[in-house]
Image (cartoon, rainbow, N blue to C red):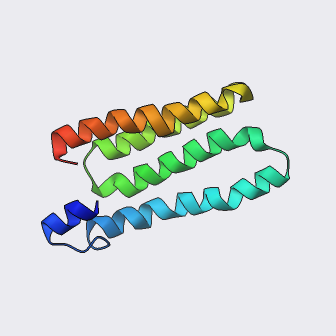
Amino acid sequence: MLRKSRRAGEPLLSGPGRKFTLGFAPPLLAGALLTPALWQAGSVVLLPGLWLVLYGAGVVTGGAASVRAVPLMGGAIMLLGAAALATPAAWGDAWLACGFGAVQLGFGIHIARRHGG
């Protein structure tokens, strides 16, 4: 992102970068606040689904000012989070690998090829 903003002659946190940060940060902050509370309550089985849903929500809202693939990626990650909440806790690591690994790699490759990064 830094290279792209330098190429465009724009500061990283102005224009689209600022909009992304303002949309992305609140769901991440919510996850950061809920994680220790769920841990302390003994509800760690909910964490993979929570992390995926909130991260996906951040990507959807942050990516609203970006190319169409970014909010779609966020929606896909949110769906994986919903699946993680509805399936056995033992599948949590697999859902995390899918959302934070496979989905982001797939969309990242697509975005890099179609939009230059």
| Residue at 17 percent of width and 47 percent of height | 116
| Percent position of residue 31, x then y | 62, 56
Is 81 situated left or right of 25 in this image?
right
Is 49 situated left or right of 24 in this image?
right
| Percent position of residue 70, x then y | 33, 45
| Percent position of residue 76, x then y | 44, 35
| Residue at 70 percent of width and 57 percent of height | 34
Is 11 situated left or right of 101 in this image?
left
Instruction: In the rendered view, tell whether residue 15 sits above or below residue 28.
Output: below
| Residue at 76 percent of width and 43 percent of height | 44
Is 38 situated left or right of 2 in this image?
right
| Residue at 33 percent of width and 54 percent of height | 64
Outermost residue on the front side: it is 3
Quadrant (top left/top right/bottom left/bottom right) for the N terminus: bottom left
| Percent position of residue 30, x then y | 62, 60
Residue 114 falls in which quadrant of the image? top left
Outermost residue on the left side: it is 8
What count of labels does the image hold?
0
Instruction: In the rendered view, tell whether residue 5 sits above or below residue 84.
Output: below
Residue 20 falls in which quadrant of the image? bottom left
